[in-house]
Image: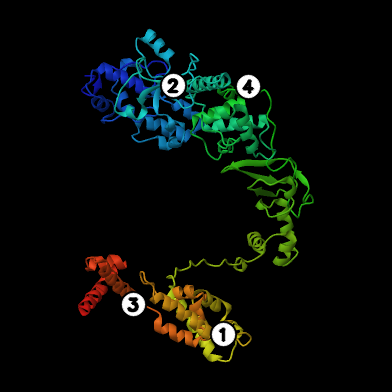
Amino acid sequence: MGCKTGQFIFFPTPYPDEILYSVLCRYHMRAGNTSTRQTNFELWGKYHGKNIFLPTGIEHFVKKIPEAACIQSDRIVSDNTVFPLIKPFISQKHAAALADAIKNGDSDIRILIGFLHNGFAKQLSLRYCEECVLNDISTYGEAYWHRIHQLPGIFICPKHGCTISDSDFLIPRATHEFRLPSVLMKSTKMRQAPHELFEKLLVFSKDTDWMLNNGYQPGFSYEKTSEKINKWLRVKGFVRSDGKTYNKNLGIAIADFYGKSFLDLFGSYDSGFCMWCEGMVNHRSYSSNPAQNLLLLRFLAGSPEAFFKEECIDVEPPSFFPFGKPPWPCRNHICEHHLQNVIERIDDKMVYGNHCATFTCPFCGMAYRRKKVLPKEKQYSGQITVVEYGWKWMETLKALFEDGKLPSVIASEMHCHFRTVMRFGVEFGFIPKERLPKRQIYVPRTKCSPVTFEESRGKYRRRWEAAYKAYPNATLSELKLIVGSSTQSWLRKNDPVWLEQNSPISKTSVPYHAGRDDEYLELVKAAIIQFKNVTGKPVWINFSSVSMKSGIPLLDRKVASGFLPKTKTYLDENIETVRQWQKRKVLWAIMTLRQRGSLINWKTIKATAAISEKQSAELKIFAFEYMKQDL
């Protein structure tokens, strides 16, 4: 057994660029365990393994390794995981949390940095280089899984310059199986790429290998990386004078630099434009996709190594001015240099990704702030946020108070709010504190229970009826003025039939259907006779069906208007309720079943008449009574 009394008897020393999963595979083989569950329990205290790229809780087995092996958790994180490839592109806070999760955590830390949506999730099989396998066997006596070969975008071995192969061992199986690479494994080798594409893939593999070996350094973090990205963008001319980035030009330039065939392998080509670079260069967020980060670094500096060496920038990046080039105008109306460009320096800081600058006039001491970038030509007007009014403004204010001028006059001359004058007047002792305007006490609004539709309808109906009874001879327009347009609009939208029945008849126009009662009556009769004589399943005789059959649009509203008394009488006698229509369907179903010679019971009647279960109780009694009378 490899573990007794909680301590390992031995533990294999990791080989160069060996991924941690491969080290655990060699431990499993040498421990002589009969099952992977037993090995996993010795390593993790559980019967299943961990993620091969960023495992969690490695301290659980590191503390069991003999001290003579000199294997520490920090060494495993830097030499046997992909953490060094990620660290330069995440914040120091996230990097510390990620490193701690690898050492002591017990969760899927891919969620911590968004690995569920980047290239790692697309990798299906463990991969190897045939030349590396032969070299490892001759050097160490066995082959192992290299860390560089498992990364997204690595199709060429950076050491031997040959195409790597996909093994038949799937990555999801690594949590419950331990297998080392072998030349006897069935594998799928990538087809030989064109020479130009092959060279680009080889260069990318070497960039990734350099980052794996150097990314764990203390100075590599997102804060430093984003600062250098901004510097390189300025050198390349992708930053405007106000600090904004030419995102479209940058995306097109990256697409032209690498080409469609190369970027398609990384899923990073968007119709001639690389959209993924926008969020990275604008400092809105950092990307956890290592491949895209490395693509950006090579485009900017030629290689990651050149990017992280400051001395490689032999051209001083041009200065940019978010608020235009100096000097800037003074906005103090009391100053003799009002609206003149006399401010040579500003205090510019980044707040939540935006430039926030404080402008201080050297002649009057007034300081004002701008929280958003504004072109120089628009800074001579508009509202500003005053930080400090300055000594000259204060002296002028005191002189006006001493002259006995009213606060309202002072506010007009000083171009400020009346409350500001009163506040300083109290502060300087010119105005009693009791005269300071009191701010209105805030009273939170109480939440009222929502008004139902029935309550609203009743309120508007009562309001309309009261006005109609009080002024029986008023026209519709006059009633609208009396009750208000909101009442009439609500009723017209939500209760039009009632409004039409309780409104005065227009004295200037008569509805076009007035005088067509006999014509409409004949059309309605013909339609209803056709419904009753139909040979198939009965059709429900209601206003909608009669209106459609007779060709009279809005029949219910025309009948309700009172201009079609004969038609209304006939419809009142023949329009069916839902229950009457259902009973007609039941009678039709019984006759139809008899003609077919089919079994007649409530189940067959209900199916033929299309009666739902909720409606069947009363109709079932009706059907049986009809059949008894018929017998």
From the viewer's perspective, is the residue at label 4 or at label 3 nearer? 3
Q: Distance from label 4 to label 1 (Cα)?
A: 92 Å
Identify the mark nearer the N-term, 4 or 3: 4
Position of 516 relative to 421 (above/below): below
From mark 2 to mark 3, how far is it between C-alphas? 78 Å
Q: Quadrant of residue 440?
A: bottom right
Q: Secondary structure at mark 3?
A: helix
- Alpha carbon of mark 1 to alpha carbon of mark 2: how far? 88 Å
Give the residue number, with chain letter if any, for mark 2. 149
Amino acid type of the residue tagged 4 in the rendering: Cys
Nearer mark to the viewer, of 1 and 2: 1
Crowd tier of the residue under label 1, counting other residues whose Cα lies within 10 Å: few below 14, some 14–19, many 20 or above: few
Circle 1 residue: 514
* Residue at screen point 33% across, 27% down: 174
Screen quadrant of the C terminus: bottom left
Residue closer to the observer: 616 or 41: 616
Whether 423 is drawn above or below 568: the answer is above
Q: Amino acid at mark 2?
A: His
Local secondary structure at mark 2: helix
